[in-house]
Image: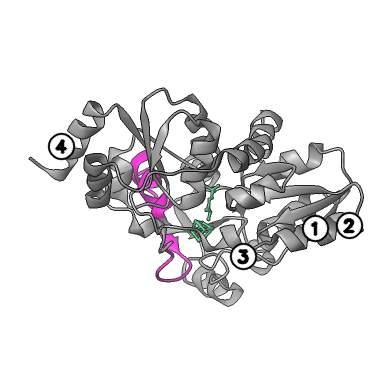
Amino acid sequence: MSIVEDILRLKKEKNAVILAHYYVDEDVQEIADYIGDSFYLSKVATKVDADAIIFAGVEFMGESAKILNPTKRVFMPDATADCPMAHMATREEIRLIKEQYEDVAVVCYINSTAELKTLSDVCVTSSNAVKIVKNLPNKNIFFIPDRNLGSFVAKQVPEKNVILNSGFCPRHVAIFEDMVLAAKEKHPQAKFAAHPECTQDVLAHADFIGSTSEIIDYVVATDAEEFLIGTVDGVFAEIRKQAPGKKLYTVKADQVCVNMKKVTLEKILDVLEHETNEVFVDEQTAKLAMVPLTRMLELAK
Ligand code: 13P
Ligand code: SF4
């Protein structure tokens, strides 16, 4: 029996579903029940009625799924697959900003620990951050942890005072403006689609800026043949499925998320077999972190 057949059999036996982010390898995306960006996956997580969720992604995704659907068992194929940006804000930074601005709303990118979520007013993802910030009653917004998504939002919502934090995605900030210019010179016909975790220098050259799903939809729907992609190359698999004729280029070599890459078919089979790497969130943290996550789902409607 092949590994894929084993996974499908065990998934059925254990009444489990597999949720996968577009950044995991193509062979993992292929066996998933649901693939998407982080907003889509968090919505799916609330509706799953299987007994278990195998989350082919990084820690904050599994943690959010557990918080949003606490009666389900959630498992991570690799317990060390974590997003470094999720840890790039502190309780102390939030306390200081709250002391300084009375009416401030703490807006927390979903790429964050459950602890940071407990200190926040609302969560956002890259696909709904602008909409949510625009509709908040507060003038002052403390955007954590990603300074790049925060800058992008600030530009779209000039009526707000967006205070930035210093977090960043190591993969997206490694795409530099000079690399974009060189890639554009090499592929002059290509449209450039980038994720808002890229720096403002890079985003200034983009024809389209959006979440992973939005980038995929843009490439598929746009009447051009060549695209330069400013995000992790895991999105190529879905684009090739939906629009096989398009030519796709990365800005630089190795546009990969090393943590998402840790998720393999072997590890998925292993957690299905042995029920290891289960996600637990303590009751008090889960109760508090549920508030900004639920508010996100409501405000993004
Ligand atoms: P999306 O919300 O676009 O899926 O992005 C998640 C992420 O981690 C980007 O680096
Ligand atoms: Fe985190 Fe960056 Fe990987 Fe996204 S690409 S999960 S932000 S490290």
| Image: 109 above or below 65 | below
Residue closer to the observer: 117 or 122: 117
Quadrant position of the C terminus in the picture: top right
Amino acid beneath label 1: Arg
Amino acid beneath label 4: Glu
Local SS, label 3: loop
Q: Do callouts 2 and 1 mark residues in contact (Cβ within 8 Å)?
A: yes
Q: Is residue 86 left or right of residue 154?
A: left
Q: Which residue is mark 3?
A: 168
Residue drawn at 57 percent across, 55 percent down = 195
Q: Which residue is mark 1?
A: 95
Pointer 4 or 3: first along the chain: 4
| Image: 88 above or below 14 | below
The image shows residue 148 at horizontal and vertical percentages of: 67, 61
Pointer 1 or 3: first along the chain: 1
239 within the magenta span? yes
Instruction: Give the spatial CA distance, label 2 vs label 1.
Output: 6 Å
Q: Do callouts 4 and 2 mark residues in contact (Cβ within 8 Å)?
A: no
Residue drawn at 39 percent across, 50 percent down = 246
Instruction: Give the spatial CA distance, label 1 vs label 3.
Output: 20 Å
- Observer-side mark, 4 or 2, equals 2
The part of the chain drawn in magenta is: 234-256
The dot on residue 5 is 4
The dot on residue 190 is none
Is disc 4 surrounded by few (<14), some (14 to 19) or many (20+) residues within 10 Å?
A: few
Amino acid beneath label 3: Phe
Amino acid beneath label 2: Glu
Q: Which residue is mark 2?
A: 99
